[in-house]
Amino acid sequence: MLQKSGISEGKADYKVPGGKLIRMRVRYSGDVLREVRINGDFFLHPEEALEKLEESLKDRSLKEAVEIIREFCQHVEMAGVSSEDFIKVLKLAVKKDF
């Protein structure tokens, strides 16, 4: 974790049981996400929905992020990953349990 002027940076890679990888890079201050980038080898449809998720997490608290991720995952087609996998990698990236 790197910290610059109140902004922390975190990253995590999580290999989902079954083989899919989720990679997350975050910038946050306190418990508020400032920037989130997600990629990996999982399937998501529509593909552009991932960018919308990243944008919707911007300037949200970590607790709000959990609900946003759960809601998001109900409205997209995914293979090999679940909402709980995304939440787990977020917790790993910020090194916090919330």
Image (spheres, helix red, strand yellow):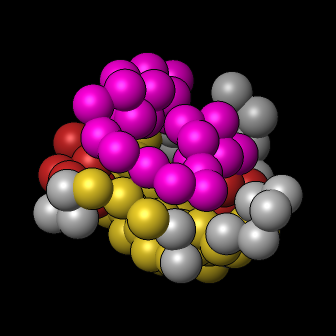
**Image coordinates for residue 44, horizontal then vertical, percent:** 36, 58
Q: Is residue 43 magenta?
A: no
Q: Nearer the viewer, residue 76 or 95?
A: 76
Residue at (27% x, 48% y) in the render: 53
**Residue 61 in view:** no
Q: Quadrant of residue 59?
A: top left
State the extent of the magenta-drawn residues as a range. Answer: 62-88
Which SS does the magenta portion mostly show?
helix
**Image coordinates for residue 77, horizontal then vertical, percent:** 35, 45
Vertical position of residue 48 compared to residue 56: above or below: below
In this figure, what is the number of numbered marks? 0
Q: Quadrant of the C terminus?
A: top right
Residue at (40% x, 35% y) in the render: 73
Residue at (45% x, 74% y) in the render: 39
Would residue 77 appear left or right of 86 to someone viewing this image? left
Would residue 67 appear left or right of 80 to someone viewing this image? left
**Residue 36 in view:** yes
Would residue 13 appear left or right of 77 to someone viewing this image? right
Q: Is residue 87 magenta?
A: yes
Q: Nearer the viewer, residue 2 or 36?
A: 36
Q: Quadrant of the N terminus?
A: bottom right
